[in-house]
Image (cartoon, helix red, strand yellow):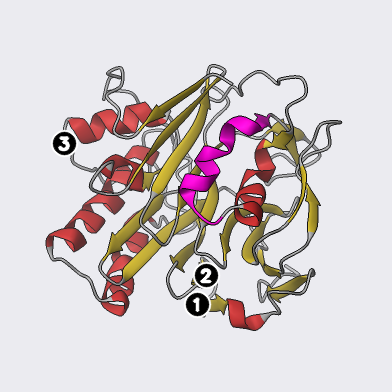
Amino acid sequence: MKKSVLSLAVVVTLSTGYIANSVACTSAIYNNGEASLSVRTMDWFGHDDAIVVGAGKGITSQYGDTAEAMKTKSKYASIKIKSFTPQLVAEAMNDNGLVARILYLGNDYTEMAPDRTGVPDVAASQFPNYAVDNFGSVAEVIHHLDNIDVIQDKVCDLPGHENECIAAPVHYHLTDASGQSAVIEFIKGEVKIYQGDVTEAASVQYLSNDPEFGFHMNLDKEQTESGSTIRAFDRRLRAKEVIEDMYARDVTDNQLALNSLKAAGASVFSGYDQLDPYVNNVFPTLWTIYTDQNAKEIYLDRYDTWQVEQYDFTMFDNNDAQVVVLGAHPNSNK
C-alpha cells in the first residue's frame, strides 16, 4: 500500500477561494491535564434513528464480504453508534479509550489504494468497527494499517439515496486517552495519515468534510478566521477556535473542560433547516456526541429531543460476547 505519514505536514497550497460542500460533520479533540475529550456532529439531510449498542469482548466479526475479508475476535468491549437504515457504525469507543469515527469525504476526493492479493480486506464502512474491536490506541491502529487493504464498499438506503447503493464516501478521525490523534484519508489511490498530539500536529485535532485534509491544513497555516456559514471549513474553524480558547485558558479539570466543550458543539450545530446561501441547501446536524476517553463515557444529544443520553461501560457485561442495545431514539417509529 502506498502510504504517506505526516505528523505535521506541509501540503500543496489549495486556493482558499474554493467553495466547499455544505455536508459538514465536524469533529474536535481536546487533551489537557485530566481531560481527554472529543465532540462530533453527524450532519446529513434526513432523519437518523441512531441506536447505541454495547459490544462485549470476544465477538467474532468479518469486516467485509470479499473472499479475503478480515475476520477477528474482538479484544475490547466497545460502545457503538449505529446510524440510518443500514445501521452503519459511524462512531465507536472501546474500553481502552480509543475513539474511531467515520466522516464524509466526497468521492471526488476519495479513491482507495489498490487491493493487494493475499492481504486481508477491511471494507471502508467497517473501519471504525475494525479499529475499536482490535486495538487500544491510535498508534496501534496506524502500526497495523499496512497489514490490511481498506477497500471501497457500498452503503444502501441512506437518506436521500433510498433504494440506491453508493460508494462509501469516507475518511476517519481517531483519538485515544493518551492524547494521540489521527486523520486517515485515501486520496488518488494513496493512504494519507496525519497524526500526533496537539503539540505535534495541532491541525489533526479538528476534522470536517470536503475538500481533502490538506485544504484545511492550509487554512490553519494561513491563520484563516472562521465565517458564519454551515460550510465544512467554517464549522471546523469555529470548533478549532473554541478548543484553542480552552487551551489558552488552560482548562485542565475534566468536568470544566467537558462543560466548555459544549461551546464547540454549539458552534458547529446547524439545527435542522439552516440554509447555506452559498449552495442553497441545508445539511442539518442530526446528533452531537461528546466522548470522555478517561471516564469511558459518551453523551448523545439528538437534534429533535431535549434529553441528553449518557452511556458507559457499566451498562453491559464487557466480557460477554454479545451485542446489547443500550438506547434508541425515543421516536424511532416516526
Foreground of the two, 90 or 186:
186
Whether residue 103 can be seen here: no
Q: Is residue 196 above or below residue 326?
A: above
Residue corresponding to mark 2: 300
Which image quarter holds the N terminus? top right
Give, as a three-letter code, the residue at label 2.
Answer: Leu
Secondary structure at badge 1 equals loop
The magenta stretch spans which residues? Answer: 136-151
Secondary structure at badge 2 equals strand
Give the farthest residue toward the right: 67
Q: Position of residue 63 (x, y in %)?
A: 75, 43
Residue 323 painted magenta: no
Which image quarter holds the C terminus? bottom right
CB atoms at circles 1 and 2 under 8 Å apart? yes
Residue corresponding to mark 1: 308
Q: Earlier in the sequence, mark 1 or mark 3?
A: 3
Q: Position of residue 181 (x, y in %)?
A: 40, 48
For the point 31% across and 48% down, the residue is: 197
Whether residue 300 can be seen here: yes
Residue 112: image quadrant is top right
Give, as a three-letter code, the residue at label 3.
Answer: Gln
Left or right of residue 167, residue 35 in this image: left
Give, as a three-letter code, the residue at label 1.
Answer: Val
Disc on res. 223:
3
Spatial CA distance of label 3 from label 2 is 32 Å
Disc on res. 222:
none
Q: Is residue 27 above or below residue 261?
A: above
For the point 73% across and 27% down, the residue is: 119
Q: Earlier in the sequence, mark 3 or mark 2?
A: 3
Number of labels in the image equals 3
Spatial CA distance of label 1 from label 2 is 6 Å
